[in-house]
Image: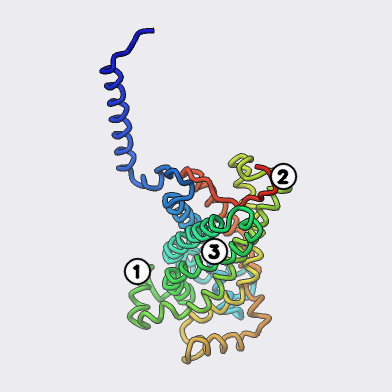
Amino acid sequence: TTARSPLFTSSIRTQVRCCCHQQQQHTMNTPGAVLLAPSGSTKYDFQYYLKGAAAGGICCSVTHGALTPVDVVKTRVQLDPVKYNKGLIGGFRQIIAEEGAMALTTGLGATAAGYFVQGWFKFGGVEFFKINAATSLGEEKAWENKTSIYLVSAACAEFIADIFLCPLEAVRIRSVSDPEFCDGLLDGFQKMAAQEGIGGFYAGLVPILAKQIPYTCAKFVVQGNAADSIYASMGKTPSEVSSGTAVGVSLLSGVIAGVASAIISHPADTLLSKVNKAGAGGDGPMMTRLANIAKEIGFVKLCTVGLIPRCVMIGTLTAGQFGIFDTVMGALGASKFHFHNPNVES
C-alpha cells in the first residue's frame, strides 16, 4: 500500500469540505429548499413541523378546491332547499341549466386560498401539539391517552386555523349564495369590507368554530384510531409496510373519519351557510340570529338537509387529505409521527 503524505490527506479533506459547502449553498439557493432540507439531529424539530404545515396546506387546498362544484351544490341546497330539492345530481343539472357549468366553480379562489391557510395551521398544529404532548407524557402514557391528545391537539390547532379561514369562508359563501356579488376573491374582500366592515368577515366565526372544531376532533380521533386498528389487524406497524400500503391505510381510515365527522358537524355547517346569507336570522346579535335560523329551520332539517352530499364530499375530501398529506410528507423526507404501543414490539 502506498503511503499518503499529510499534505495529500489535508488536500483531500479540504476538497471534501469545499464540495459539501458548495452543495449546501446550491441546495439552500433552490426554491423551497427549506422544505427539502433534512431535519437536524432531533427527528421532530422545526423542519418537521414546517413540512407538516406545508403538506397540510397542500392537501387541504387541493381537496377542497377539487370539490368546489360539490360544495356549491351543497351550499345552494342548504340556502334554498325549496328550489334545490332534487338531490346532489339534480342540483348539478339545475345549476348548469340555469347558470352554466362555470357556476359550479364559484368561490374556487377563496376556497383554495382559505383552505391552504387553514390546512397549514390545522395539520401543522396537530402535529406540533400531539408530538409535544406525547414527548411530555412519555410513550406509555401517550399511548394510553392518545384519544385525549388527539382531541386537545385538534381543538387547539383548529381554533387557530379558523381565525385565518373565517374571512375567506365568508367571501366564498357570499359569492355562492349571490353569484353577482363579486368577480373573484380580491373583489369579494373589497366589497365585503366596504359594505360590512371587518365584522362582516367574522359574522360566521361562532358557527364556523362550532362546525370545524367538532369536525376536526372527530376527523383526527377517528382516523388515528381507525388506522391503528387496520395496522393491528395486519399485524404490522406503520414503519413495517410499504409507502403504497401506508397511503392505502390513510385513504381507508380517512373515508371512515370523513363520514363520521360530516355527520357530527353538519348542523353547524348548515347554520354557517345560512348566517352568511344577507339578512338571514334578522338584524340582532349573532347568537340571536343563529337561534332564529335554527328555530326557523327546525332540528331535524338542521341535521339532515344536505347531509348526503356533505357525507360524499367530506368522506372523499378527508380520505384525499390524509392520502396527500402522507405522500407529501414522504416526498419532503419526513417520517410521520405515530403513537406507539409499548406492549407491542416494533
**Residue drawn 44% across the image and 50% down it:** 45
* Badge 1 vs badge 3, beta-carbon distance below 8 Å: no
Location of mark 2 (residue): 234
Residue at the limit of the structure toward the right, as seen here: 233
Label 3 neighbour load within 10 Å: few <14, some 14-19, many 20+: many
Q: Report, in whole angstroms, how far the alpha carbon at label 2 lies from the one at label 1.
A: 49 Å
Q: How is the image coloured?
A: rainbow
Q: Nearer the viewer, mark 1 or mark 3?
A: 3
Residue 66 appears anywhere in the view: no
Question: Mark 1: which secondary structure?
Answer: helix
Question: Mark 3: which secondary structure?
Answer: helix
Label 1 neighbour load within 10 Å: few <14, some 14-19, many 20+: few
Residue 26's place in the image compared with 211, above or below, is: above
Q: Amino acid at mark 1?
A: Leu
**Residue drawn 61% across the image and 77% down it:** 267
Q: Amino acid at mark 2?
A: Met
Location of mark 3 (residue): 153
Location of mark 1 (residue): 186
Label 2 neighbour load within 10 Å: few <14, some 14-19, many 20+: few
* Residue situated in front as seen by the camera: 246 or 324: 246
* Residue situated in front as seen by the camera: 282 or 96: 282
Left/right of residue 128 with respect to residue 303 in the rendered view: left
* Residue situated in front as seen by the camera: 65 or 53: 53
Residue 62 in percent (x, y) is at 49, 56
